[in-house]
Amino acid sequence: MTEGKLKVALTRRWPESVERRMADAFELRINEGNRAMNDEAIGEALAWADVLCPTVTDSIGQELLAAPTVKTKLLANFGVGFNHIDLQAASRVGIAVSNTPGVLTDATAEIALTLMLSIARRTGEGERLVRSEQWDGWHPTHMLSTQVTGKTLGILGMGRIGLAFAKQAHYGLGMNILYSSRSEKSAQVLQGMPARYCPQEELFEVSDFVSLHCPATPETRHLVNAATLSKMKSTAFLINTARGDVVNESELVAALQQGVIAGAGLDVYEAEPRLVPGLRELPNVVLLPHMGSGTIQTRAAMGECALANILAFVENRPLPNQVN
Ligand code: DGY
């Protein structure tokens, strides 16, 4: 490691309060342009920094990590998801990887809730109508939509965020909760909330809303596809605040065009920030720009969490959130 101050590189701008704390503690380099860095720029950062702090928009694979110039010993990711980092390649060359779990749970669950309400109650369409001056006033059959209260929500991936969303939906909207996950959760993990563990197939078949909360892994890639969508009710909605890769987006567009399901609320996409052809034109989707964790409070907390991992690394303590 560098003599003197630790060299830390941020691939994006961070909330100012955390940048200031980092600049006080370390020799800090920030990608001032604040645009996604290309491989060459990431390679340079890996050759300079003891600690590199990537985000979801930086793809850090085997080739970059195995380069002989790499000096970095810790990738302190700003975010909970780390599917953009090749963990095995990092481990092979002795690079630790940490993430920022816990602090973005409520914020992300709020966006899942927002998407569920928006798509069912057609608020995006309604807002566009008012803004375009096409609204001709109230009438009894105008903009009829789907009531959410009391319906069944299927949570795919009952981790922290899935559970937080399920609680908002159950206690706030009286929804029945089903979930599929790697394992059945104890009443203690579920914090007493009634929720029924069921096979994935049943979850797709009976839910009025299916919400994705699983990580992006080779096993979950395109888990939502033409076949799984065809099992859903034609009145049901899909919500995705997890990762774009979990959904085969082209097959989702086809399903929405053909009325296989009623609609979708998406915060994440397969090739962000690009959308697959046809998605933008659909009336029965609500599309958000990957903003699940995007509250002022949460983004600062994510920065603080990444900083805590770096400080543990400097002081040779176990990292609070090491993932490899
Ligand atoms: C996360 O933390 O994984 C968010 O999606 C932003 O990367």
Image (cartoon, rainbow, N blue to C red):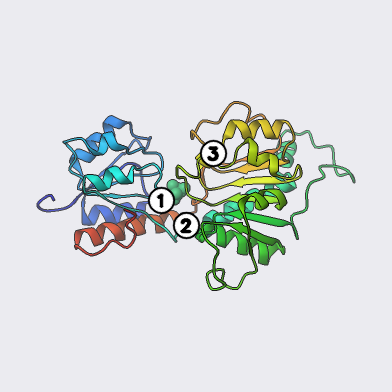
Residue at position x 34%, y 35% in the image: 33
Secondary structure of residue under mark 1:
loop
Nearer-the-camera pick, 259 or 317:
259
Asked if residue 112 lies left or right of residue 263, the reply is left
Q: Are marks 1 and 3 in contact (CB under 8 Å)?
A: no
Q: Which kind of residue does numbered mark 3 sit on? A: His
| Residue denoted by label 1 | 79
Q: Are marks 2 and 3 in contact (CB under 8 Å)?
A: no
Mark closest to the chain's N terminus, 1 or 3: 1
Of label 2 and label 3, which has the lower sequence position? 2
Q: Residues within 10 Å of mark 3 (few under 14, many from 20)?
A: some
Asked if residue 107 is positioned above or below residue 189 in the image, the reply reads above
Q: Which mark is residue 104?
A: 2
Residue 131, relative to residue 192: is it above or below?
Answer: above
- Residue 101 image offset from top left, x and y in percent: 42, 58
Can I make out residue 282 in this image? Answer: no
Mark 1 or mark 3: which is in front?
A: 3
Q: Residue flagged by tag 1: what amino acid is it?
A: Gly
Q: Nearer the viewer, mark 2 or mark 3?
A: 3
Please tell me which residue is depicted at 11% across the width and 53% down the height of the picture.
Answer: 4
Question: CA gap, disc 1 to disc 3?
Answer: 22 Å
Q: Is mark 2 within 8 Å of ligand 1?
A: yes
Q: Which residue is mark 3?
A: 222
